[in-house]
Amino acid sequence: MSSRRNLWIDRALVAAALALAAAVFFTRESVTTTESEARSDNVIGVWRQDQLTAVFLESPHALRLEKQASGASGQAEWWMSGPGYPRTSADAAAVDQLLAQLRLGIWVRRLEPGAADAHALGLDAPRGVLVLSMGGSDYRLVLGKPAPAPSGGSYLAVSGAGVDEVVGIVKQSFAEAILVDPREFLGRALVPYGRGDIVRLELSGAGGPRKLTRAGHRFRFNGMLGDRLVDSEALDPVFFHLARLTSEGFLSLPQAEAALGRGERVDVQLWANAAKTPVSLSVGGRCQERDKVVALRRAPEPLAGCVPETVMAGLTLSADALLDRTPFGFGADAVERVVTERGERRLDLVRNEAGFALKAPVAAQVDLQQGNQRVEALVNAKGEIVENPDLSRLGLAPPLGRTTVTGLSSVTDLAIDESVGLGQPDALGRLPLLRQADSVVLLIPAEAARAFEVDATLTRDLALFTFADADVSALHVRSERLEQSLVRVNGEFQLEKPSGFAFDASLVSELLSSLRTLTADRWVSDSEDGSFGLEAPVAELTLVLARPSGHAAAPPQARTHTLTIGQSIPGGAYARLSTIPGVFVLSTQAVRAVTTPVLSRQAFSLDLGTLTAIDFQTRERKVSLVARGGGWASETPGVDGRHALNIAEAFGGLRPPFAWHIGKPTVQEGFDTPTLVVRAHGPGAVVTTISVGAPHTFAGTSGYFARISSVDATFALTEQSVRQLLDLL
């Protein structure tokens, strides 16, 4: 009995569920009381986005917007069609903006039923008509004349199937939605394709003819310049500015054609993978707006507007500027593997999760920074193109070696190999390369050519020294300007060279700290081959370290490390260390740190409190200060007490960061016609003279030469400290 009763209950529940589903289905287009009350002030009383299938603009423009499910994604997409607009995908953002304006629009005021005079309100000759197809509620919106109030308001009549007719006044934004220009739905982007979609590109006009076609993951010239490869990085501005061709406002086609004639122009045609016809457009001329030029798309859908003038910079690049002068077409971050083969020797570098792994000539893990530096040096190497090359003379018939780079294509995401043949370096160390992809021969500078060597420098530690300050027994630095020797005696340093000078303890401490933490920027060679400028070095530093001998009664044994700094290169200089075979690069900052003189700057530390007067003489003016009542005064016209104090304080900050050299000044230092001479009067009628000479760049830092009367040496003053004082005088 119980099971039979449960069966009837189950059947009742099923029947109730079916009835509820049927009710929902048959009443899904009915307007509920809650829904009606919630939108009582809205122009469109019922809004059901999921049931909205079409929007018709009947006037002043004829346009049909239809929503359809995409076959690929199943998501809804909007399509547009109408006279002069072949069926095409509508700009989703423009459609969303229109629908939002319609959905959110509210009545400013409703007119009483039957009180509306269609002719008086302009509803019999409307300015615009828009129809919404939305399930069982189709709305027809008829826009009449502008209303007296509010400003920008208009009369509107709403009717439709299953909709009560209402006449009232709407805001300007709602009226503008009905009067929308159909071109808005074409989208404002004049080029509807991304770089990966474009397979052919032709430009003419300003910048000259340029015909490019896709070759795998790269572009090459088509029917010009020997069909050579195009530099991917140089091509970036072209595609960047094509993507920026987004019209700001619309121009009629006659307006655009006329404006194009007011200046230089570029004509562009581009073909995409799936497109049947090319995109054809012109950019240039002059818009009425400042810093704007015209962009006119003639096909496939005509569209014209104004774009920033800066787009011309990328679109006018010449063919020569686009010509690839690098060995490979990958960015450094896309490279997965590098293999260089020279006879029996082989280098095999592979990117992995920890950085890079070197498979040959030795097996080792490579620091990420060092691996990236090698890869960047390879892909960024830039040379000159050799016209009509003699391959045999260059060592390229056949090549003496080969470098192959494996990289990920940004177009296909597939791994692709690119190779260059390696030739015989010339007398200047320049390396000829035969680019396999287009048979172009490049002559790579000697510095860049080192990246194509087979060596084990990638496994070298970048740290150069390991010592404690207490281990240092002597330090000798010889440069083009100065030779200085520090020797520790009874636990304290003494300056042996130059004799007769004192040293600055803080500068010695900074020098030792710089040496203790000194690292190579990168290693470039396993051995010195005479091309690094190390035979005639610009500086040499010898560090002598005391090392315990292991026997208490025996004296300590010395270890000597000699750092030789050779030829300068961008960002640094070549160097070697006597205790480690090979050549590395020191950064400019590191070179400056280990060659800065340690001579004392104490002579410049004048105590303002003991001075009685200070005289300043520039090339145009003399200013004199006198100490008075714990402050400073001046009888120089235009210099009051406050101004005098500022001058004195600026003079107090005139401290050199380091000495430049000892001995007499050179003519180039500018002391024959100094920038500034300062005479400081101290106790006992002692006068200290500071002369500021010519401006100069000291190891990458701008400043001025300076000398002080009590020291036979030239010092460096920072530009900021000198300019601050000069500006006050």
Image (tube, helix red, strand yellow):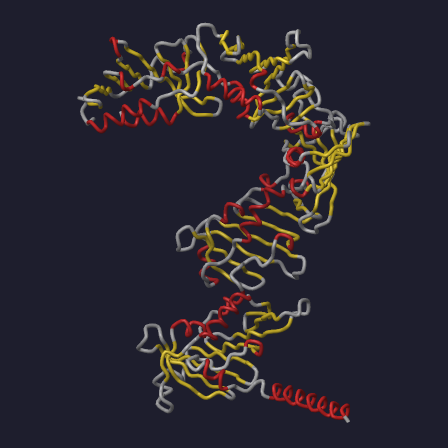
Residue sitting nearer the eye, 60 or 423? 423
Question: Which x, y percent locates residue 469?
Answer: 56, 18
Question: Which x, y percent locates residue 288?
Answer: 39, 55
Q: Residue furthest right?
A: 344
Q: How many marks are shown on the rendered structure?
A: 0
Question: Which x, y percent locates residue 610?
Answer: 27, 16
Quadrant (top left/top right/bottom left/bottom right) for the N terminus:
bottom right
Identify the residue shown where x is 23% and y is 16%. 612
Q: Quadrant of residue 531?
A: top right
> In the displayed structure, does residue 547 sit left or right of residue 264?
right
Residue 348 can be seen in this image: yes
Quadrant (top left/top right/bottom left/bottom right) for the C terminus:
top left
On screen, residue 618 above or below 29: above
> In the displayed structure, does residue 128 sit left or right of residue 618?
right
Q: Quadrant of residue 632?
A: top left
> In the displayed structure, does residue 505 sit left or right of residue 572?
left
Identify the residue shown where x is 61% and y is 22%. 574
Identify the residue shown where x is 45% and y is 23%. 697
Question: Which x, y percent locates residue 545?
Answer: 61, 14
On screen, residue 686 above or below 117: above
Residue sitting nearer the eye, 258 or 627? 627
On screen, residue 180 above or below 624: below
Q: Residue furthest bottom?
A: 1
Residue 326 can be seen in this image: no
Q: Residue furthest top?
A: 499
Identify the residue shown where x is 43% and y is 14%. 600
